[in-house]
Image (cartoon, rainbow, N blue to C red):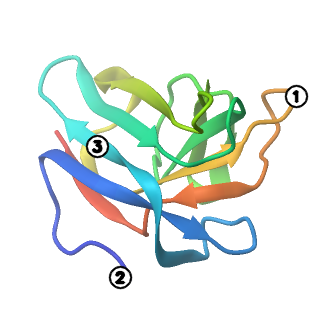
Amino acid sequence: MAGSEGSFAGSTKAPFYTVTNGTSDQVTNTLGGGSVTFNAPSGNVALIINGDVKGLQPNFKYAAWVRDLTGYTGPSLTSAPSLGYFKLGTFSTNSQGNGSFHFNILRSDLPAGTYSLQAAVNDAGPDDPYIGQTVVATQKYTVVDVG
């Protein structure tokens, strides 16, 4: 699956897949457990990102990254501007290795447009600038229209 065809307004769900070499540029076709939903509502919130992961390391801290949020000016823990990647926050897994994350991106922080998004979950290091290794990611790309 090389990418998603067409663009979607509203809610779009993308499953997580395993990766090789710790990078979201090498996503396999093997389901990794869990998914992310991108929702582009109307109003003050331009994009809602809800993710759930399953089967990761228990009681471990992970970081949620989203690419390609080109033009995004809102808060993030760190970013990789050349890739349009933003580390939006961290979450911890429970004793079964399951966890979740939720982010609201305000309309004032993200220009209207069509975005080819990819979500990735990396291990979270001791500080915010830490990038870490990707453990699961969505396929490139889920196309979402943000109004």
Q: Residue furthest front?
A: 96
The residue lying toward the viewer, choosing from 105 and 120, is 120
| Number of residues whose C-alpha sits closer than 10 Å to that of mark 2, classed few (under 14), some (14–19) or many (20 or more) | few
Say which residue label 3 marks.
38
Q: Is residue 140 above or below residue 126?
A: below
Where disc 3 sits, the SS reads strand
Disc with the residue nearer the chain's start (1 vs 2): 2
Residue 77 position, x and y percent, is 68, 27
Q: Is residue 21 above or below residue 128?
A: below
Residue 147 position, x and y percent, is 16, 39
Do tag 3 and tag 2 residues touch (Cβ < 8 Å)? no
| Number of residues whose C-alpha sits closer than 10 Å to that of mark 3, classed few (under 14), some (14–19) or many (20 or more) | many
**Which residue is depicted at the point 14% across and 56% down?**
8
**Which residue is depicted at the point 65% across and 56% down?**
135
Could you tell me the amino acid type at mark 1? Pro
Quadrant occupied by the N terminus:
bottom left
Say which residue label 1 marks.
126
**Which residue is depicted at the point 59% across and 27% down?**
94
Disc with the residue nearer the chain's start (3 vs 1): 3
> What's the mark number on residue 1?
2
Do tag 3 and tag 1 residues touch (Cβ < 8 Å)? no
Where disc 1 sits, the SS reads loop
- Looking at the image, residue 10 sits to the left or right of residue 118; the answer is left
